[in-house]
Amino acid sequence: MVFQRKHILGLEDLTAEEISLILDTAESMKEVSLRDVKKVPALKGVTVVNLFFEPSTRTRSSFEIAEKRLSADVLNFTPTQSSVVKGETLLDTARNLEAMGATVIVIRHSMSGAPWLLARELDSSIINAGDGSHEHPSQALLDLFTVREVKREIQGLKVVIVGDILHSRVARSNIWGFIKLGAEVRLVGPPTMMPQDVEKMDVKVYYNLEETLKGADVVIMLRIQMERQGSGLFPSLREYSRFYGLTRERLKLAKEDVMLMHPGPINRGVELSSEVADDVHSVILDQVSNGISVRMAMLYLVASGGGNA
Ligand code: CP
């Protein structure tokens, strides 16, 4: 199968075959990352811009490392040091970067839909690095990759996603990804943090964490997104933690070989206890390492084979 897409905007848009192709390509990229010289010439002469309008540690750094491992020319654009502060629009900013030779733009923006706007208006390939509370495809792909690496198959797994589903682009992309690859997806969190139409997505919705964890193969904990929610969705962090925080005792309800995941950044003591974050079941740092291989695959596929989809 040949990857026909010029952009990677969200997992809702991708087929199961396209997702599997990205994961297979990431496996080859991981071999590059294990070599002494972690570099291939795949994107030599290609200029990639990282256009991050929101803070990031993992996504931004690993896209940059991925681009450098593929020998791309990399520009890290910092909006606060740019003419954005003088009122230049997102579209004008992106058009100017394209005029300087950028052909791949990796964008993170607080506005849901921003990557789609650039994909419609520019000639460059666009990769969504997180748009508002909508999608975070590279995170979901690295989560799928990490689970597939351990469990071999996604089909039939019981995947639990815990917490602030309403504001989580990670949850949304993971729901699409795990469902498309045949997993059973269970969501659990306070009713005020559950999207109203979520049951249309072929997921099971719960409000009791203990009940949801029974027999789980994978548990994905989400961060409470203080920056995206108004006040009053739960009484206090302590209260949230009491009902939805993951402890070692609660994790014992899942399967013995459960994988514990978190996209980061972690609020230790809120969504999970510190001992659980560093527990033997935790693959949180494996997720981070795998992010490089998965992002290498995404960059390579859109830059080298992308059609017009
Ligand atoms: N998982 C994630 O998106 O982390 P960053 O915000 O640090 O990129």
Image (cartoon, rainbow, N blue to C red):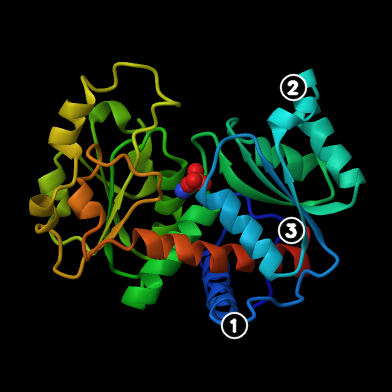
The residue lying furthest to the right in this view is 99
User: Eyeballing the image, is 102 above or below 111?
Assistant: below
User: Eyeballing the image, is 239 above or below 2?
Assistant: above
User: Eyeballing the image, is 167 above or below 24?
Assistant: above
- Nearer to us in this view, 11 or 268: 268
Report the side of 271 relative to 71 (left or right): left
Task: Describe the element under mark 2 as helix, strand or loop.
Answer: helix
Work out which quarter of the rendered image holds the N terminus and state it: bottom right
Q: x and y percent of residue 84 in the render?
A: 76, 26
Q: Residues within 10 Å of mark 1 (few under 14, many from 20)?
A: few
Q: x and y percent of residue 136 in the render?
A: 52, 47
Circle 2 sits on which residue?
85
- Nearer to us in this view, 166 or 29: 29
Report the side of 135 relative to 4 (left or right): left
Name the image quarter holding residue 172: top left
Q: Of the numbered discs in the image, which one, if any, rests on residue 100?
A: none
Circle 3 sits on which residue?
6
Q: Nearer the viewer, mark 2 or mark 1?
A: 1
Q: x and y percent of residue 191 in the render?
A: 24, 29
Give the mark nearer the N terminus: 2 vs 1: 1
- Nearer to us in this view, 266 or 147: 266
Q: Amino acid at mark 2?
A: Val
Is residue 299 visible in the rendered image? The answer is no
Q: Nearer the viewer, mark 2 or mark 3?
A: 2
How far apart are the alpha carbons under marks 2 and 1? 42 Å
